[in-house]
Amino acid sequence: DLTYHSFRDSNIETYLLAAEYLISKGYYVVRLGDSSMKSLSNFHPNLIDAPNHPEYCPLVDPYFICNAEFTIASPSGPFHLARLFKKPVLAANSPICHLYWGHENDVLLPKGYYSKQLGRLLTYKEVLLSPVCEYSMAEEFENSEIELINNTPEEILASVKEIESRVSNTYNSPENN
């Protein structure tokens, strides 16, 4: 029972637009996780739904991450393996936490932080300057009346395009425009 980490959950359906994009560019997409997750086995031949494969063993996760150009993950096991192997990470549907960053090609796509008390989304600055930035349990968000809003498929796709351009050295920073 990992409900205390439920704030990290997201819907796999929101990643499929990005998976289609990567597959159209010639990538293989490997989904990691556990067999309790919804199966994507019939999505596309270039998408390997590892945890739902009958021969899957979690010991292959480091192999996939080590050989990846980049990883899309929330702060979890695959995220930390990518950090270990110095692979760029797109942290989609991620909580905002300063402990996860510092690598040049990483991309942070945080969840939205909706304050029920204020009736609006908090700004990035408001999150960073408040205790909510340090929350690590779902109950802390609930007690503070903060609802985390998942990223849209379009936001994830745009961030995938950004990290792909960063790793291929074709990224044109908005600061350069």
Image: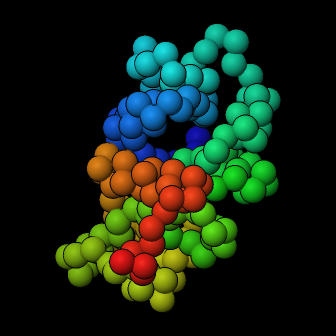
Q: What is the number of callouts on the image?
A: 0
- Quarter that holds the C terminus: bottom left
Quadrant holding the N terminus: top right
In this rendering, position of residue 70 left or right of residue 94: right
Q: Residue at x 64, y 44 (%)?
A: 69
| Residue 167 spot, x, y in % from top left | 59, 54
- Asked which quadrant contains residue 11, the reply is top left
Residue occupying the point 39% across, 85% down: 126
When the figure is inspected, residue 94 is found, relative to residue 30, above or below; the finding is: below
Whether residue 44 is situated above or below residue 67 in the rendered picture: above
Q: Nearer the viewer, residue 10 or 91?
A: 91
Residue in view at x 56 percent, y 23 percent:
48
Q: x and y percent of residue 151 in the render?
A: 35, 54
The relative height of residue 142 versus residue 174 in the rendered view (above or below) is: above
Asked whether residue 143 is in view, the answer is yes
Q: Is residue 84 left or right of residue 124?
A: right
At 45% from the left and 35% from the top, the residue drawn is 25
